[in-house]
Image: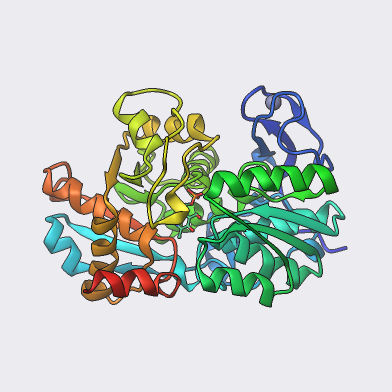
Amino acid sequence: MPRTESLVSHFECYDCGRRYDLDHTEFPCPACGGILDPRYDYDSLTTTRDEIEARDGSMWKYRELLPIRNDDDIVSLGEGNTPMIDCPELADEMGVARVTIKDEGQNPTNTFKDRGASASISGASQQDVEEVAIPSAGNAGQAAAAYAARAGIDCHVVLNYQSNDIQKTMVEVHGADLHLVDGKLDKAGGRFGELRDEHDWYTVATFQTPFRHEGKKTMGLEIFEQFDWEGPDGIFYPTGGGVGLIGIWKAYQELAELGWLEDETPPSLHVAQSSGCAPVVEAINEQRTEHTPWDCPESIGRGIEVPDPGASPWMLEAVYETGGTGVAVTDEEALEGALAGARHAGIEMCVEPGAALAAAEQMAEEGELDEDDEILIINTGAGNKATDALSYAMK
Ligand SMILES: Cc1ncc(COP(=O)(O)O)c(C=O)c1O
Ligand SMILES: [Zn+2]
């Protein structure tokens, strides 16, 4: 079988440090319930930065830094390699040197979740798994269904009735088995746990699988490459479970370790959340190293309506180590942010990334951004995922 030249060596538990072989399928860490993280043998890398830059194609151009060993196990729909779009009007408005938006809406199922799904379904293929399962607010479930269909793997998706019609419909269009439950994400997670234990399903849930944050890591690798290996000054990320935030943080650490960065100062990683569900922002404001679960979450940005994100210690490490902050915005502000992206830059955004843009605007208004700052906003999902909310916002 052709090899990917991946440098992956093993999984290591972020929480207790135990090591597991790559064929280990019991996620999360059986010893402590912690997050398993793929680790790499960076010293063996022979590929150069220039060689990677010369490659085109999907996120798999960074295959040496991804945990899949054989080409045949890669399940891809051309995800990644998304554009970095300059937004001078927004930069003028915020009084900063440069605003760019990385448009993850241009991925195959229109969100950045495709990167995690490509990596986790490839991981399932590598581990000879024929059936996977995931609870989701909507987008991750849709992405998993698409990649599982491509791989010929059976997929079970647990969503809430509140997930939007596109997400629910497309899960079934891809041939996955859809389970709908009342309530919010915690209920979907609860039901998922029961079904997983009952049927012994292989999990591709957030931070249960060790593969999803690796896929999202490619977003960070691309950001540094697109910023000529220097990175912007600050990155605004709409934060739910934190998979993308941690992926970007890991990308920075890897590139620093490889000596590929022109400037070793990390970009400040700013957590944007909804004021209706802001457990990570609250922890940052109180300088804590772990969140307190949020009672009664309420936001129309369902992807960031995550009341009890298990990876908060890792997210908070990323924020504190990079000099980042936490900003909570209302749903109205998030919708206005999405409209601003569409009207001032032509970029179609759903509600969650609208919160990230609104968070940057809030920091600019409060004088917390410098006039020579270059900032990046991640458009995690396209406007077509939220047309109802966006049309409501225009009234
Ligand atoms: C559009 C969108 N943005 C942001 C998020 C939050 O992602 P993460 O879990 O990586 O924090 C989600 C998660 O569902 C999402 O769908
Ligand atoms: Zn552990």
The foreground one among 386 and 47 is 386
Give the residue drawn at x 78%, y 68%.
151
Against 177, residue 357 (above or below) is: above
Depth check, front residue: 376 or 273: 273
Judge left or right: residue 223 versus residue 52: left
Q: Quadrant of residue 148?
A: bottom right
- Residue 17 appears in view: yes
**Viewer-closest of 64 and 81:** 81
Q: Examine the rendered structure and indicate whether residue 348 appears above or below residue 129.
A: below
**The C terminus is located in which quarter?**
bottom left
The quadrant the N terminus occupies is bottom right
Q: How many marks?
A: 0
Residue at 61% x, 74% y is 170
Identify the residue at image location x=67%, y=41%.
208
Specify whether 226 is left or right of 26. left
In the displayed structure image, the side of residue 306 where residue 68 appears, left or right: right
Residue 376 visible, this angle: no
Residue 179 left/right relative to 153: left
Residue 229 % position (x, y): 41, 52
The percent position of residue 372, horizontal first and vertical second, equals 16, 50
The residue most toward the front is: 182
Q: Nearer the viewer, residue 156 or 375?
A: 156
Residue placed at 46% from the left, 36% from the top?
A: 315
Vertically, is 336 above or below 304?
Answer: below
State which quadrant residue 311 falls in. top right
**Above or below — where is 275 with respect to 164?**
above
Q: Position of residue 321 (x, y in %)?
A: 39, 30
